[in-house]
């Protein structure tokens, strides 16, 4: 039986809501609590307190670990929500149990955390992150490609899909071979613009024809599809360019990218 | 009056900077300190100053000590062939309380957390590798927390230490003693089953 009669029950109903959520990151709070940053499917990015979660006797156990997708019952607070219940939908334990997968997943979560607005529903972003984590789990050997592909799809979902099939400055068709990516213009630029309008195209990143082809393929396909040819040496260059684009777009450096470089 | 005096506000602001202390708690602690006799506040202030002046990190294992090396590193009865890696000095205390470990320690100062920008270079891995290369240690027990960051740290350590020919072990994780099976989440229960031991 609930306490407080029907009025209190109605109030509780207004302040509590259930949703699917992926834990992006956690911070310690006080003696045994944690603050969680969660991307929910219908209620956007939320900050929530999980009480007592650090105790070995916590009823939450591993349900609120980073990357876990859980069905949550959250109580809206004035500043932060409180986690009332959590039931694991997909634990992604396999991703946490592999150092390389975990680092790639952390980079994906950091990107989502950087671009998702608090309390603004982002169901497309949620679905992309869930799909990205599922691909890391199901295709661990393709982790680096999955992360680069995920980043491309996130850019597109945010309305910043790079222009890769024609000049981002003048619209003219691009030549074959190496391409120059303008961070300022958000796409490849043609030789003509490079010579005549250098000030308009700003800082450029040079990539091989193979990398340009891979990026173009990514921009025209959905996460979960795979190219006929497995990516080769061009993957490293594609990752480098995606990192530069994201840093330019979000105007921040990603901490997980730095940690990734320290991995053996 | 909508604000306290400058001294009280200053005290609240400083208390607010402590971990886990919010503005309300800081205000409550400040008002409590003002209500107790001066001897009590003097004792507290002296304890903080003394701890800050005398306490340092052990030059060998980075545990907290008041000498150059901590009591555990100084203790000749300790088994120096077994080295336990923990995240924080409080984890040393927790393991010592168990009374089940007689080896030595290494305190990393945290755990790998890519999203927070904490990588191997921010932790005391280089110092640990230096100790291991001296050749005395035969087993490395990884006792980082059983959470995502602790596991990532354990995996990194295992990858770095295995080539040295040292046995790397991880403390067991699973069901807490005194708990009910039905309340265990699937990850914890899965690990408990995976690491079951013969009776």
Image (tube, coloured by chain):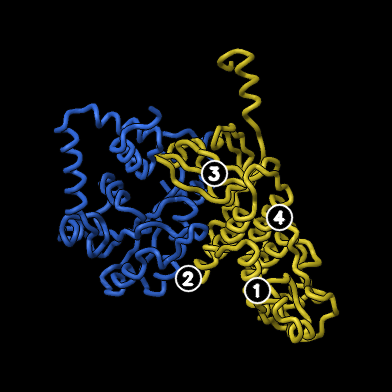
Q: CA distance from mark 1 to mark 3?
A: 33 Å
Give the residue pinned by disc 4: A128
Above or below: residue B173 compared with residue A203 = above
Give the residue pinned by disc 2: A262
Which of discs 4 and 1 lies nearer the camera? The answer is 1
* Label annotation for residue A64: 3
Q: Position of residue A97 (x, y in %)?
A: 53, 58
The residue furthest top is: A5
Q: Nearer the viewer, residue A65 or A123?
A: A123
Q: Give the image quarter of residue A168.
A: bottom right
Which of discs 3 and 4 lies nearer the camera? The answer is 4
Q: Tell me, by letter, which chain the rendering colours blue.
A: B
Ranked by sequence position, the earlier of labels 4 and 2 is 4
**Residue sitting at 38 percent across and 32 percent down?**
B3
Tags 4 and 2 on a common chain: yes
Ranked by sequence position, the earlier of labels 3 and 4 is 3
Is label 3 in contact with label 4 (beta carbons under 8 Å)?
no
Q: Give the image quarter of residue B137.
A: bottom left
Of all chains, the one bearing label 3 is: A
Ranked by sequence position, the earlier of labels 1 and 2 is 1
Q: Position of residue A239 (x, y in %)?
A: 64, 72
Q: Position of residue B15 (x, y in %)?
A: 33, 40
Q: Nearer the viewer, residue A155 or A132?
A: A155
């Amino acid at each position: 039986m609930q306490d407080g009669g029907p009025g209190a029950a109605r109030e509780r109903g207004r302040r509590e809501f259930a949703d699917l959520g992926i834990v992006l990151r956690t911070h310690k709070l006080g003696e045994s609590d944690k603050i969680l940053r969660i991307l929910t499917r219908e209620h956007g990015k939320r900050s929530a307190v999980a009480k007592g979660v650090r105790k070995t006797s916590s009823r939450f156990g591993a349900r609120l670990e980073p990357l876990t997708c859980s069905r949550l019952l959250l109580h809206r607070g004035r500043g932060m929500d409180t986690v009332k219940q959590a039931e694991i939908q997909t634990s992604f334990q396999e991703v946490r149990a592999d150092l390389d997968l975990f680092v790639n997943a952390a980079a994906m979560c950091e990107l989502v955390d950087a671009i998702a607005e608090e309390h603004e529903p982002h169901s497309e972003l949620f679905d992309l992150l869930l799909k990205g984590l599922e691909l890391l789990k199901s295709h661990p050997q393709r982790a680096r490609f999955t992360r680069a592909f995920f980043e491309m799809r996130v850019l597109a979902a945010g309305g910043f899909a790079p222009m890769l099939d024609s000049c981002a400055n003048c619209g003219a068709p691009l030549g074959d071979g190496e391409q120059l990516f303008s961070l300022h213009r958000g796409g490849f630029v043609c030789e003509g613009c490079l010579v005549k309008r250098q000030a308009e195209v700003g800082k450029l990143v040079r990539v091989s024809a193979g990398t340009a082809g891979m990026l173009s393929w990514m921009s025209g396909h959905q996460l979960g599809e795979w190219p006929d040819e497995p990516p080769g040496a061009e993957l490293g260059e594609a990752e480098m360019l995606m990192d530069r684009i994201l840093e330019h777009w979000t105007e921040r450096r990603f901490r997980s990218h730095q940690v990734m470089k320290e991995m053996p | 009056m909508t604000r306290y005096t400058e001294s009280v506000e200053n005290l609240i602001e400083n208390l607010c900077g402590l971990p886990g202390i919010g503005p309300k708690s800081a205000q409550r602690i400040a008002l409590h300190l003002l209500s107790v006799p001066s001897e009590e506040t003097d004792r507290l202030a002296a304890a903080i100053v003394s701890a800050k002046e005398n306490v340092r990190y052990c030059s060998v294992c980075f545990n907290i000590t008041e000498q150059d090396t901590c009591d555990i590193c100084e203790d000749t009865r300790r088994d120096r062939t077994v080295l336990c890696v923990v995240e924080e000095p409080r984890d040393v205390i927790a393991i010592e309380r168990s009374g089940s470990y007689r080896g030595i320690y290494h305190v990393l100062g945290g755990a790998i957390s890519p999203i927070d920008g904490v990588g191997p270079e921010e932790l005391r891995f280089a110092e640990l590798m230096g100790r291991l290369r001296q050749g005395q240690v035969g087993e490395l027990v990884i006792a980082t927390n059983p959470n995502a960051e602790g596991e990532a740290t354990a995996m990194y350590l295992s990858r770095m230490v295995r080539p040295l020919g040292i046995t790397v072990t991880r403390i067991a994780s699973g069901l807490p003693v005194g708990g009910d099976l039905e309340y265990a989440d699937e990850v914890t229960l899965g690990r408990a089953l995976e690491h079951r031991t013969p009776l």
